Amino acid sequence: MYKKRCKLDVLRSISKTNSKKGQVTVFIIIGIVLVLALALVIAVQTEVIKFGTDEVSPPEEGKVGSFISTCIKNIGEDAIHQIGLQGGYVTVPNSIANDGFVHLRTSPFQVIPYWAVGSTTNIPTLDDLKLRIDQHLEQNLKACVFNSQAFQETYDLIEKSDISSDTKIENSKVIFNIQWNVELREKSGSLVGEVLQHRAESPIKLKKTHFLATRIVEKELQNLKLEDIAQDLIALDHPNVPISGVEISCSQKTWDVSKVKESLQGLLSHNIQQLKIQGTNFEEFPEDLPYYSSHYIWNVGEDIDEDELSVSFDYEPSYPFTFGVTPLTGSKLKSSQLGGSDVLSFLCIQNWKFTYDLEFPVRVRVRDETTGYNFNFAFTVHLIRNEPNRGLIIARPTTTFETVTDEAFCNTRDIPMTVKTYEHITNEEGVDFRNDLGDVALSYTCIKYKCELGNADYNFGDQGFSGLTTNFPYCVGGILRGTRDGYKETWERVITSAGQEIELNLVPLYKFPHAKVTILKHELLEDGSMGQGIPLSTKESALITLTYRKSNDPVNQPSHETTFVRSFDIDPKVVEESEFELLAKADFPYDVDITLIDDKTIMGGYEGVWNVEWAELQSAQEMVFHVFTTQKDNEEELASLLIAKEATSKNLPKPELK
């Protein structure tokens, strides 16, 4: 009443001192003030009932919102860390976790899916990562909030809608946006407020780590960088990892295959750890290690300039390791011995050449140095016969097959495939054609199990091709081999798939008798010319190697090679029955290397290129090789001649077919 009376007094005073026009103005002003006051009261009441994340809220509601945001951040970062541990997965699917061919197991409970196996990739995208984070938040946020006793004693939290997550993966952070209507009520039932929008952030640079990881795999598929490193380590010719060599000795050289494997794994483990990514954070190699600086800093793109990221590579001997080396005798690698027997008693030459098949995984870790976050992924590395080759996959042994015999494994053949067999003739001069070829013995090897499939026949089953249709056992990367007398053995790496057709191309060979080979020696005269060719003496022998290499082979590996010895100490009957093999039905250039030996002393030889014409080869009655020799006793002069053997040989006649 007091307030009303005051207001009336004020109005009377105004009405006495102003005109009617003034009175109207005053009433209008008062009305506006009252309307604004009423609107403010309504706004305040509305604020108490509902608020957003950026609005001022009562203390209780602020605590609830902060608690929910903490849950969101913890669950979101848990998803990101699981993704980092498991190559892009919060939970690894059973199809991957139960298949040892497609993951690297790092503990009894942890696997890292391979992002690349051979040429097949499985790289998760950023959209995949976002979806997995969103799913993890939507599945676990409710439990985090409602299982807590933080507010249960005083308030009730009531869920009014489903949880909807929309994660944003940005360059420098990850933002977790949640749409979830949660009411906060007192125990009496009175509404304190509700929260609709929730937001939390993580400083982890998931986008940058994922981008760099993806780039590394893409460049590995293009450049075969890890295969090159493995190939270089084999080529080092470590004492315990032999590759090729010749030695004048009567003691056969042997290597234990388990020691070879162990030594090679040690080389890989140490050196792969040295690999760095250009443009990232790493410690420079010392100046006294120039090889590492030039070979172990990998440029995966000029756009990589990330001082906040570092990358580490590792292979551990405990990782799966498929290892094959040929030729192998039992558990030993052995040199081939020429001489030191009844056949060639006065001369001993040890020579060896081994080829390696390798498949092993490499784990890569991209680290965000600003937060300590690690993003792990893995891929497999492949060498076939010493050569990088991601297109051919060696199946890795798994516990599934360890107790299976050849017979039991081959009895699981239930995948029908067709093999077509051809005679393939091709050379550097444009010859390239195929003919159907039957009577080819086929076999299929998977890990350590071998299944004989039978023979491919001409016009198999009246289907118009030479080959065989039969069932194969399942194998991720088995070897299909084809053999036939008079042809080079051929093979293809095959992933079994119902209805697949595989083609095997066999290269024809021509057998030439040792008895028809003649070696003529020419004495190197003082003026550099060669004397007249004369046959070898009974104390002399020659080691001959003929090698054909394809000019387009990037690693210059022999496509065909044959080695044999001519000596009068060899039993004539053995010589009469022996043959060596050359490529047939086309002309081929061979690198010819001959070493002339007299009483264990190298005294000359020949080195050059010889083009063998097929028309002459198949009708030849004699093959003649010319070698140089010298009577010089000066070992240094003789050594210089042998080092320049190819240049010295240019004064000799080319090999001949007569």
Image (cartoon, rainbow, N blue to C red):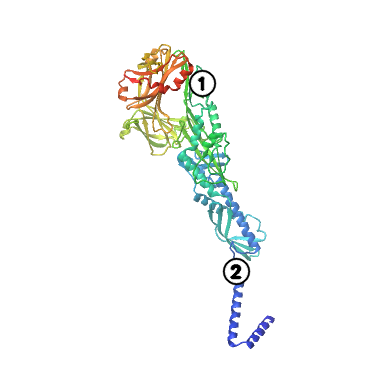
Q: Is residue 247 above or below residue 499?
A: above
Quadrant location of residue 539?
top left
Q: Position of residue 638 (x, y in %)?
A: 46, 18
Q: Are marks 2 and 1 in contact (CB under 8 Å)?
A: no
Q: Is residue 22 above or below residue 566?
A: below
Disc 2 residue type?
Answer: Thr
Specify whether residue 548 is in view: yes
Marks counted in the figure total 2
Q: Residues within 10 Å of mark 2 (few under 14, many from 20)?
A: few
Give the mark toward the camera: 2 or 1.
1
Who is closer to the viewer here, 327 or 180? 327
Secondary structure beneath dot 1 equals loop
Question: Residue 98: x and y, percent?
Answer: 52, 41
**Extreme residue in the right direction:** 2
State the residue lying farthest toward the front.
527
Most foreground residue, 250 or 650? 650
* Res 610 quadrant in image: top left
Query: Residue at the location (39% across, 24% down)?
Result: 608
Residue 11 position, x and y percent, is: 64, 84
- Report whether residue 396 is seen: no
Residue of label 2? 46
Instruction: Residue at 40% x, 35% y: name it.
Output: 471
Disc 2 to disc 1, how far (Cα)? Answer: 92 Å
Q: Which residue is mark 1?
A: 253
